[in-house]
């Protein structure tokens, strides 16, 4: 495979966003239609490229691109393995599912305020974070994410958006500051920010340096992932933008933080991943429980679902905590289960937030005490919401069941009884919460029929732009559950590649700086 394909998920959304920014200032109907078409085309090509990369990576190969022909550590390295490919594909699916919902529901004012260029910039930042093999460029892509998400969060100028946006950006900037400081310490002590070369040099670095870097990266990435106790920025901000933006954030942003924790600790600090296992499992259990309990006290659909995002990040970290253990199941089983759970959550949580957004727009609000009776008016939406909800809770045959069962199985196999029990309790609480949402929104009788806004789901085109993506994501979740063994085999390959530090280093092949006099034109993959 041509390694230049690695540049497509980054360069294509960037160039398309620049093009749309150039035409956004005209703001007419034709310009909006053009932006929609360009965004849809870009995201379709992006998904096709991600699928190609995933197929090649899961055949056992890492794909490496040294930008401009400059070999590492001087040039910018892009690298994709099975985990990268899976997450790129899921990012493409989520973005392509959210786009038609956004077209149907985003108001014209926001569309004219560069909504589609920002959408593409966000996708570019997510893709870049998954692909980069350099710690400083990871920081750059994080900042691209932060800028695009902050504007998407606040565009529209509502007071609630502004207040939540300030909290969001300030707290995320603090995490970015910790990350930048860690990168500075890494460069000062190791002399490089190339991740493969860092992994080599950290083996002989003093324990104090390794412990400091590991702690700072855990704080920085844990904040991005909304882990306990750094989660409070998420529920205070995700409920304020339009539902399409919330769905995009809920499906993608915290997964970037989870991915970076997976990558950094397996590559840089495998010994600390074992030594700090009680810390990882403790954070995972607290995150699961706090998120599930916090959701029970929330008065609106999106605030409930925002707390569920927090809770389910804990399940992913639980898999990482036992990644290097495995009595009867083998080393790497926990990480494979965590990757499968991440795939399940990205699909189902996006679909469920879109369904909740459809309820909110159709009813004119999402406060549980002031909505109801939709099961008679919107039976298809009721069915899609219900099935998405039970998938999130882990009811078979959907993907939530096989992914949660795999995580429970590995924690029992490794005799971590407490975190296993917490995961079961959190799953039960999730089921109670989502059934509460379904009962309040769809059951009973709505007491204020004059407030209804029938324009959204009564128009045939809008109806399918709204319901089609939800149904598509639900079908993918069902397929992930019905063919769970096949997908688990894929995530097992990805997990083994992530745990193979020597293979990652050999693929990037950092060279001795003194031996490099000029950039090389060779680009390769192993």
Image: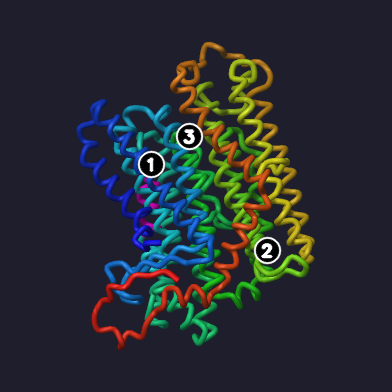
Image location (x, y in percent) of residue 307: 60, 44
**Mark 3 and mark 1 residues within 8 Å of each other at the beta carbon:** no
**Residue 115 in view (yes/no):** yes
Quarter of the rendering containing residue 273? bottom right
Q: Secondary structure at mark 1?
A: helix
Of mark 3 and mark 1, the one earlier in the sequence is: 1
Image location (x, y in percent) of residue 313: 60, 53
Q: Please name the residue that numbered disc 3 is placed on.
A: 243
Residue at the (68%, 21%) spot, across then down: 443
Q: Is residue 16 above or below residue 244?
A: below
Nearer the observer, 387 or 158: 387
Of mark 2 and mark 3, the one earlier in the sequence is: 3
Image quarter hosting the C terminus: bottom left
Q: Which residues fall within the magenta stretch?
A: 141-153
Residue at the (26%, 25%) spot, across then down: 29
Q: Is residue 249 above or below residue 172?
A: above
Q: Is residue 98 left or right of residue 511?
A: right
Of mark 2 and mark 1, the one earlier in the sequence is: 1
Q: Please name the residue that numbered disc 1 is placed on.
A: 152
Q: Secondary structure at mark 2?
A: helix
Q: Is residue 139 above or below residue 405?
A: below
Q: What is the number of the mark on residue 521?
A: none
- Would you say residue 151 sits in the magenta stretch? yes
Q: Residues within 10 Å of mark 1 (few under 14, many from 20)?
A: many
**Nearest-to-viewer mark from 2 and 3:** 2
Q: Secondary structure at mark 3?
A: helix
Q: Please name the residue that numbered disc 2 is placed on.
A: 333
Image quarter hosting the N terminus: bottom left
Image location (x, y in percent) of residue 32: 29, 30
Distance between mark 2 and mark 3 Cα atoms:
35 Å
Q: Residues within 10 Å of mark 3 (few under 14, many from 20)?
A: many
């Amino acid at each position: 495979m041509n390694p230049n394909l690695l540049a497509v998920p980054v360069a294509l959304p960037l160039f398309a966003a620049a093009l749309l920014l150039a035409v956004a200032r005209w703001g007419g109907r034709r310009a909006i239609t053009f932006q929609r078409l360009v965004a849809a085309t870009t995201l379709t090509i992006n998904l096709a490229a991600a699928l190609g990369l995933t197929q090649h990576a899961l055949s056992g190969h890492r794909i490496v691109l040294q930008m401009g022909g400059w070999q590492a550590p001087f040039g910018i390295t892009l690298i994709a393995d099975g985990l990268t490919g899976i997450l790129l594909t899921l990012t493409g699916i989520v973005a392509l599912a959210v786009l038609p919902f956004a077209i149907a529901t985003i108001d014209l004012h926001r569309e004219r305020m560069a909504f589609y260029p920002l959408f593409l910039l966000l996708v570019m930042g997510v893709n870049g974070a998954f692909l980069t093999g350099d710690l400083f460029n990871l920081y750059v892509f994080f900042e691209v994410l932060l800028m695009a998400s902050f504007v998407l969060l606040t565009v529209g100028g509502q007071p609630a958006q502004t207040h939540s946006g300030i909290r969001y950006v300030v707290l995320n900037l603090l995490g970015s500051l910790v990350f930048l400081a860690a990168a500075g310490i890494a460069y000062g002590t190791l002399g490089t920010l190339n991740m493969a070369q860092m992994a080599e040099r950290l083996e002989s670095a003093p324990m104090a340096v390794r412990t400091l870097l590991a702690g700072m990266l855990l704080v920085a990435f844990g904040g991005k992932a909304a882990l306990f106790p750094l989660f409070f920025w998420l529920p205070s901000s995700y409920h304020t933008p339009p539902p399409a933006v919330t769905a995009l954030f809920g499906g993608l942003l915290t997964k970037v933080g989870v991915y970076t924790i997976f990558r950094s600790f397996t590559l840089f600090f495998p010994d600390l991943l074992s030594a700090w296992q009680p810390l990882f499992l403790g954070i995972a259990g607290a995150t699961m429980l706090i998120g599930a309990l916090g959701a029970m006290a929330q008065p609106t659909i999106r605030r409930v679902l925002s707390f569920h995002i927090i809770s389910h990040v804990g399940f992913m970290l639980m898999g990482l905590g036992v990644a290097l253990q495995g009595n009867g199941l083998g080393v790497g089983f926990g990480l494979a289960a965590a990757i499968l759970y991440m795939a399940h959550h990205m699909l189902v949580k996006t679909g469920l937030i879109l369904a909740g957004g459809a309820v909110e727009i159709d009813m004119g609000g999402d406060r549980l005490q002031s909505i109801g009776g939709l099961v008679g008016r919107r039976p298809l939406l009721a069915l899609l919401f219900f099935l998405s909800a039970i998938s999130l809770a882990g009811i078979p045959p959907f993907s939530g069941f096989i992914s949660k069962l795999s995580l429970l199985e590995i924690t029992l196999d490794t005799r971590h009884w407490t975190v296993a029990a917490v995961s079961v309790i959190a799953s039960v609480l999730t089921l109670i919460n989502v059934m509460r949402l379904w009962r309040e929104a769809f059951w009973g009788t709505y007491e204020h029929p004059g407030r209804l806004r029938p324009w959204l789901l009564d128009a045939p085109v809008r109806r399918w732009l709204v319901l089609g993506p939800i149904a598509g994501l639900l079908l993918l979740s069902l397929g992930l559950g019905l063919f769970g063994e096949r997908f688990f085999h894929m995530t097992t390959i990805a997990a083994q590649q992530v745990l193979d530090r020597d293979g990652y280093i050999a693929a990037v092949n950092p060279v001795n700086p003194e031996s490099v006099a000029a950039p090389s034109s060779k680009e390769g993959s192993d």
